[in-house]
């Protein structure tokens, strides 16, 4: 999915939705922009706020409108639609490769999966959107481990914040799903409650 200039889009949505915008340099840049912006702005409508939250979530995971809408539609059948939507988004193979530290960004993780570098339960896969469940194991294909693509993976895994629903082995470049992702509103850059409201209209 082609996204366009990430800094510009992140500023427009008012959130560091891409990995490259989650830096102190970007935060300072955003702060300076807000101070210099003297133009009064009209308060956004409820629809406008919900639309922005939807875009934040969709661009954070780098998925198409069609894919995103499909996840929301399936989530609306759940008793806890926000949690279900978060689980759909977090349980994608490309996101797990990113969360486990195998890739620097979700975009890189998507490319890893699409090019056949990843395995699920020991089998080579090429579909980044595969949904994983508790008990599944994700790994880097044996023939790909020597690639420069994974040269810093071990350090990233040791230094990174691995979510509680994953266990990761930096030596074997394997990650196991040991639980379900839990959506905590104040820990996310988007509001999935607003997203559900947007699609419930």
Image (cartoon, rainbow, N blue to C red):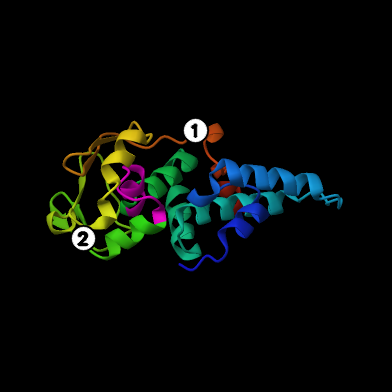
**Is the residue marked by circle 2 packed among few (<14), some (14-19), or many (20+) residues within 10 Å?**
some
Give the residue displayed 29% in from the left and 64% down from the top.
114
Q: Looking at the picture, how far across and down is residue 76, in whole percent?
A: 48, 48
User: In screen coordinates, is 154 left or right of 46?
Assistant: left
Give the residue displayed 60% in from the left and 49% down from the top.
53
Q: Looking at the picture, how far across and down is residue 55, in whole percent?
A: 58, 55
- In which quarter of the view is residue 8 placed? bottom right
- In which quarter of the view is residue 25 placed? top right
In the image, residue 96 lies in the stretch drawn in magenta: yes
As rendered, which of 84 and 39 lies closer to the eye?
39
**Is the residue marked by circle 1 packed among few (<14), some (14-19), or many (20+) residues within 10 Å?**
few
Instruction: Tell me where the magenta segment starts and ends, as one range.
Output: 94-106
Residue linked to disc 1? 184
Give the residue displayed 37% in from the left and 57% down from the top.
108
Give the residue displayed 29% in from the left and 56% down from the top.
130
In the image, residue 179 lies in the stretch drawn in magenta: no
- In which quarter of the view is residue 125 placed? bottom left
- Mark 1 secondary-structure assignment: loop
As rendered, which of 196 and 180 lies closer to the eye?
180
2 vs 1, front mark: 2
Q: Is residue 193 visible?
A: no
């Amino acid at each position: 999915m082609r996204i366009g200039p990430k800094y510009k889009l992140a500023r427009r949505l008012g959130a560091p939705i891409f990995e490259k915008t989650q830096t102190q340099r970007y935060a300072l840049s955003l702060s300076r922009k807000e101070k210099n912006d003297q133009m009064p702005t009209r308060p956004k409508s409820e629809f406008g706020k919900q639309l922005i939250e939807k875009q934040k979530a969709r661009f954070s995971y780098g998925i198409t409108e069609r894919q995103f809408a499909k996840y929301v539609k399936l989530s609306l059948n759940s008793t806890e639609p926000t949690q279900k939507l978060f689980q759909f988004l977090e349980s994608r193979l490309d996101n797990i490769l990113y969360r486990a530290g195998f890739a620097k960004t979700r975009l890189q993780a998507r490319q890893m999966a699409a090019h056949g570098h990843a395995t699920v339960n020991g089998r080579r896969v090429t579909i980044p959107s595969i949904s994983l469940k508790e008990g599944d194991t994700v790994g880097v294909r044996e023939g790909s481990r020597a690639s420069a693509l994974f040269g810093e993976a071990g350090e990233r895994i040791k230094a990174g914040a691995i979510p509680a629903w994953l266990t990761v082995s930096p030596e074997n470049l394997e990650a196991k799903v040991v639980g379900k992702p839990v959506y905590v509103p104040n820990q996310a850059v988007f509001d999935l409650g607003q997203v559900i409201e947007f699609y419930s209209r």
